[in-house]
Image (tube, rainbow, N blue to C red):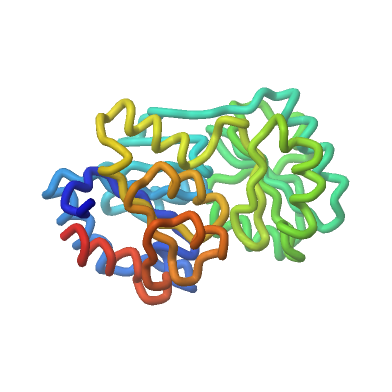
Amino acid sequence: MTSTNIKFIASDMDGTLLDEYSRLNPDFYDVFYQLQDKGIIFAAASGRQYYSLIDTFAPVKDKMMFVAENGTLVMHQGKEIYSCTIDTPSIHEIIKSAREIEGAHLVLCGKKSAYIETKHQHALEEFQKYYHRCEYVDDLLKVDDEFIKVAICHFGGTEELVFPKMNEEFGESHQVVVSAKIWLDLMNAQASKGAAITHLQNTLGFTVEETMSFGDYLNDLEMLDVSYHSYAMDNAHPKVKEVARFSAPSNTDSGVLKVIKEKVL
């Protein structure tokens, strides 16, 4: 299976396309336009908020595909083309449970905005990296929006301190995924980056064999699973390396761009 038949490329952001300082390599735009000339769709597939992603890719935001919020919202040219929401009663159960975890800081993710109720300075600085449209509210339970995700930040590590409780309580009814060392997301049971990309494959008419993806963490597993050309970054979580068919240099070595230049362009 060669890489010359690629029609769709999806890349995670943090730990994958972005460097260790969350910066986008300036060479990205040259690569992006070359892909566009070949008719290849490029998507940023991230746990980040849509409004954060369009700021990052401002020069090409009307040309790119955005698989945002871990696949719960897909946007193209400012229009929603797929979403996977959570009903409000379930959201309230998740919020109440997460509030019981000492040291946990919550972000309620809606289609219109993200919402927070903490004033913890370290948490606020962390939120600003990923949520560029964010509102402070007195009580998350009173927010009115269409909800796509609850994100939980814990500086002690979510895999150890958040996942066990949330997975025990919600693992059978929702998607509970560790998306970074200090982040965990709860979503609709059907939601994932992989589900979003499968929707795009079915609606835009490209196949698993024509799909390339890059990831580094546990929220990328389903995306890699629906891509024949699946790449784990050299800095990836061990489980990601087990699932991916191929390996790419680390994010600090511009691994995504190197592979695309070598295998596709």
Q: Residue at x 35, y 34 (%)?
A: 78
Q: Quadrant of residue 239?
A: bottom right
Most foreground residue, 50 or 225: 225
Q: Quadrant of residue 80?
A: top left
Residue closer to the observer: 41 or 50:
41
- Location of the C terminus (image quadrant): bottom left
Looking at the picture, does residue 11 appear above or below residue 28? Answer: above
Task: Name the residue at the left extreme.
Answer: 37
Q: Position of residue 139 (x, y in %)?
A: 79, 37
In the displayed orientation, state which residue is furthest to the bottom.
253
Say how many tags the image has. 0
Q: Height in image: 100 above or below 153?
A: above
Left of 151 or right of it: where is 209? left
Q: Is residue 1 left or right of residue 130?
A: left
- Measured as percent of width and height from the top left, residue 243 is found at 48, 54
Residue sitting at x 21%, y 54%: 3
Which residue lies at the image location 28% right of the left edge and 43% below the top edge?
209
Between 167 and 30, the residue placed more toward the observer is 167
Tell me where residue 79 appears, x and y as whole percent. 36, 30
